[in-house]
Image (cartoon, grey):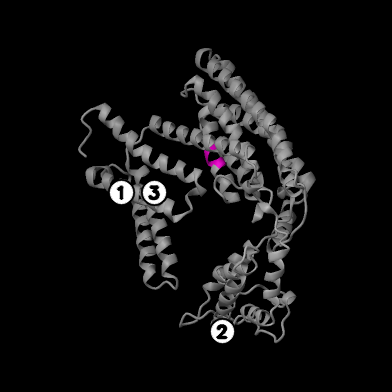
């Protein structure tokens, strides 16, 4: 593609270059977060093709980049090549190939948005379309939930999992669109009739981000708020849009948090019905407020002296609020160092099941610590590819079901063997097929136990030979107590 012959041709080219990634991102967000290979691989091919097209038809774009940008692009390309080369020595070549494909996708996305000569208006259009697109996806998904005959299917353990299908990713999707929406709602350059829509979308997205109850967001969101207010130009404007969106989410927090215990108590339909009015009311109020703010800001701006005084007042109020929040947190949680140590102790203690009114307030213990610990242990390998098992004791004869893993200081790699876990889980599936799945699982466990000298796998084989696992599978087929939402 030669240099655009006219401004119209340049606009069309820019629209095409921006529309393809935007459409793919929204499609991925609407369908399982783009996780299925049948979805993300075609999208990745399209984006790689777009990057190649840009490089072939407009090679001069590389020369317009700063040296730091070229270096960043080159380093990412080298990393992608290294990932691809790792297929040759990887123990699981399929996983390595998959990782290389993902790295190529990241390179393509980075290259497209780095190379093309975007203007501020183009960026605002893309971010605005993304924010409203995600808000639309969230709204359609919520309407589907409210009209569903089985609303429990939209939740995992009482936490909202749709449309992505994964709790933390669901929250991340909504928050990724929240910030562009709240930014565009605050800018005078945004058409006044859109500012109310962006503010309403920002509040709705923040409210939707509460439903998955991602505890990571409790730590990250306040940090991003501070960075946003400190770094984004127009601090007063930023606060005048950010504060109403956050305040609206705060006002409806009770109805949002009530969904979690309602799932456990099997009263989810009632909780969802009670949620409709607060969500609709907050959206209407934010839309009206944003529209009025846009009209006043566009057609009746304040005199410079008054605006400057208002900025000082807003800054002082924000500072006092920040100090008050910090003092309140100190009063509630005490010494932050001690609290951080307690949180780490909870996190590293392992999975702890407890009932509470909110997942936000439950224990930080989970299986992630062991996932990471076992993954790091995979790096400790002796020549020949065998894992170092210095700290793993030998299996004990006659180890009982209750002793599996509890005789060890920490779980062993077989406890996190996904393939083994799937086969043994299938053995306990009440829908049938247990004998075949059990035989496959025990055969695989025996092989893994001999290969890794792993006591967990060897104990599983012992239990299977004693028909203990088979009895569990038979019992569960007739007396399943798994909640419908988690099947």
Residue 283 belongs to the span the image colors magenta: no
Q: Which mark is residue 49?
A: 1
The front one of 109 and 71 is 109
Expressed as whole percent of the image width and height from the top left, the position of residue 25 reads 44, 43
Q: CA distance from mark 1 to mark 3?
A: 10 Å
Q: Is residue 254 left or right of residue 193?
A: right
Q: Residue lying furthest bottom in this view?
A: 397
Q: Residue at x 54, y 44 (%)?
A: 173
Q: CA distance from mark 3 to mark 2?
A: 42 Å
- Name the dominant secondary structure of the magenta segment: helix
Residue range in magenta is 174-179
Expressed as whole percent of the image width and height from the top left, the position of residue 270 reads 74, 38
Q: Quadrant of residue 406?
A: bottom right
Residue 178 belongs to the span the image colors magenta: yes
Expressed as whole percent of the image width and height from the top left, the position of residue 320 reads 70, 32
Q: Which mark is residue 482?
A: none
Q: Quadrant of residue 148?
A: top right
Q: CA distance from mark 1 to mark 2?
A: 46 Å
Query: On the image, numbered disc 2 is attached to which residue?
Result: 450
Query: On the image, numbered disc 3 is attached to which residue?
Result: 43
Q: Looking at the rendering, in which quadrant would you find the C terminus?
A: bottom right
Q: Is residue 117 above or below residue 416?
A: above
The front one of 403 and 31 is 31
Foreground mark, 1 or 2, reads 2
Q: Is residue 180 left or right of residue 478?
A: left
Q: In the rendered image, is residue 68 in sight?
A: no
Q: Quadrant of residue 366?
A: bottom right
In the structure shown, which secondary structural element does the residue marked by tag 1 occupy? helix
């Amino acid at each position: 593609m030669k240099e655009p012959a006219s401004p119209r041709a340049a606009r069309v080219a820019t629209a095409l270059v921006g529309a393809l990634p935007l459409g793919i991102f929204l499609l991925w967000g609407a369908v399982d977060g783009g996780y299925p290979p049948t979805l993300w691989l075609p999208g990745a091919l399209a984006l790689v093709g777009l990057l190649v097209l840009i490089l072939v038809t407009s090679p001069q774009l590389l020369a317009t980049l700063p040296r730091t940008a070229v270096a960043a692009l080159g380093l990412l390309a080298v990393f992608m090549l290294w990932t691809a080369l790792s297929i040759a020595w990887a123990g699981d070549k399929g996983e390595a190939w998959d990782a290389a494909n993902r790295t190529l996708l990241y390179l393509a996305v980075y290259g497209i948005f780095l190379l093309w000569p975007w203007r501020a208006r183009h960026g605002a259009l893309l971010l605005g379309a993304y924010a409203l697109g995600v808000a639309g996806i969230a709204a359609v998904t919520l309407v589907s939930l409210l009209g569903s005959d089985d609303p429990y299917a939209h939740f995992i353990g009482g936490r909202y999992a749709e449309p992505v299908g994964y709790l933390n990713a669901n929250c991340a999707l909504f928050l990724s669109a929240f910030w562009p929406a709240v930014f565009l709602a605050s800018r005078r350059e945004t058409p006044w009739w859109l500012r109310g829509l962006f503010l309403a979308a920002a509040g709705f997205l923040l409210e939707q981000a509460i439903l998955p109850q991602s505890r990571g967001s409790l730590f990250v969101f306040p940090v991003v708020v501070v960075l946003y207010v400190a770094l984004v130009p127009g601090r007063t404007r930023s606060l005048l849009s950010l504060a109403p969106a956050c305040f609206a989410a705060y006002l409806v927090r009770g109805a949002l948090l009530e969904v979690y215990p309602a799932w456990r108590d099997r009263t989810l339909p009632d909780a969802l019905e009670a949620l409709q009015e607060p969500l609709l009311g907050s959206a209407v109020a934010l839309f009206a407020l944003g529209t009025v703010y846009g009209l006043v800001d566009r057609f009746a701006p304040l005199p410079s002296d008054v605006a400057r005084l208002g900025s000082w007042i807003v800054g002082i109020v924000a500072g006092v609020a920040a100090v008050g929040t910090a003092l309140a947190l100190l009063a509630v949680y005490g010494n932050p160092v001690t609290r951080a140590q307690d949180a780490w102790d909870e996190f590293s203690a392992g999975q702890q099941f407890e009932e509470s009114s909110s997942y936000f307030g439950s224990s930080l213990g989970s299986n992630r610590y062991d996932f990471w610990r076992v993954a790091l242990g995979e790096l400790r390998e002796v020549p020949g590819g065998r894992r170092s098992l210095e700290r793993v004791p030998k299996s004990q004869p006659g180890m009982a079901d209750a002793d599996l893993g509890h005789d060890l200081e920490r779980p062993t790699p077989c406890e996190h063997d996904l393939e083994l876990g799937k086969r043994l889980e299938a053995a306990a599936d009440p829908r049938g097929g247990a004998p075949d799945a059990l035989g496959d699982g025990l055969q695989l466990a025996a092989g893994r136990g001999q290969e890794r000298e792993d006591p967990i796998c060897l104990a599983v084989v012992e239990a299977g030979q004693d028909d203990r696992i088979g009895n569990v599978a038979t019992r569960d087929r007739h007396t399943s107590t798994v909640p419908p939402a988690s099947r």
